[in-house]
């Protein structure tokens, strides 16, 4: 979805990729000892990620996309958010989910990046989303 959004808006793309990739066992939400369950239980967990955005200061608006885990953004996204000063910027979260909403993700993101950042409520994108739908959504954001 992020690739389609970037292509539709002629935007740059950065993949938030964990240093240690998640396996199917890591993502087993029914296993209380799985990596993702343990990470999500700790609000301060910050799994290491690969790479960084070298020129973050050049961006005024940053879309942050992720799958919903336990009603919020994955901890690996929090690692990304912790790495930069988003002061004066606008963050637009969007999530993919088959059923769960975006929840209180914006509130969590504000708690990480601070009050001097504009964080939109965000949008849940599910199933097939057309290029036209993405254009309509982003045009409605006043970018």
Image (cartoon, rainbow, N blue to C red):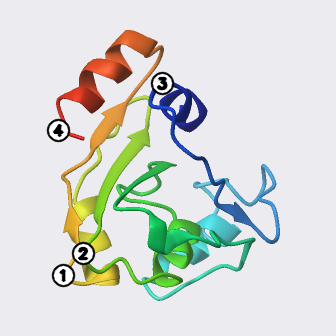
Q: Identify the residue position indicated by label 4 in the image.
A: 142
Q: Which residue is mark 1?
A: 116
Residue 125: quarter of image: top left
Question: Does label 1 or label 4 sit earlier along the sequence?
Answer: 1
Distance from disc 2 to disc 3, alpha carbons, whole Å, reads: 25 Å
Residue 118 placement, left or right of 92: left
Q: Position of residue 41 (x, y in %)?
A: 47, 77
Q: As drawn, is 81 to the left or to the right of 120?
A: right
Q: Residue at x 53, y 83 (%)?
A: 83
Q: Are marks 3 and 4 in contact (CB under 8 Å)?
A: no
- The quarter of the picture where the C terminus appears is top left
User: Which mark sits nearer the N-terminus, 2 or 3?
Assistant: 3
- Tag 1–tag 2 contact (CB < 8 Å): yes
Q: Label 1 to label 4, Cα distance in Å?
A: 20 Å
Q: Secondary structure at mark 1?
A: loop
Q: For the N terminus, give its image quadrant.
A: top right
What residue would you read off at disc 2? 88
Give the image location of residue 39, x and y in percent. 58, 76
The residue lying at 55 percent from left, 73 percent from top is 80
Give the secondary structure at mark 4.
loop
* Residue beneath the point at 66% across and 79% down: 47
Rendered view: 9 above or below 24: above
């Amino acid at each position: 979805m992020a690739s389609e959004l970037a292509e539709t808006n002629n935007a740059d793309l950065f993949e938030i990729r964990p240093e240690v990739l998640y396996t199917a066992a890591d993502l087993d939400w029914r296993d209380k000892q799985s990596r993702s369950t343990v990470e999500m239980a700790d609000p301060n967990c910050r799994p290491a990620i690969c790479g960084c955005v070298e020129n973050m200061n050049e961006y005024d608006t940053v879309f942050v996309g992720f799958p919903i885990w336990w009603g919020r953004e994955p901890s690996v996204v929090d690692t990304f958010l912790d790495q930069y000063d988003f002061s004066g910027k606008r963050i637009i979260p969007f999530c993919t989910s088959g059923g769960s909403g975006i929840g209180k993700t914006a509130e969590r993101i504000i708690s990480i990046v601070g009050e001097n950042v504009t964080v939109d409520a965000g949008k849940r994108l599910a199933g097939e989303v057309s290029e036209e739908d993405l254009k309509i959504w982003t045009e409605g954001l006043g970018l």
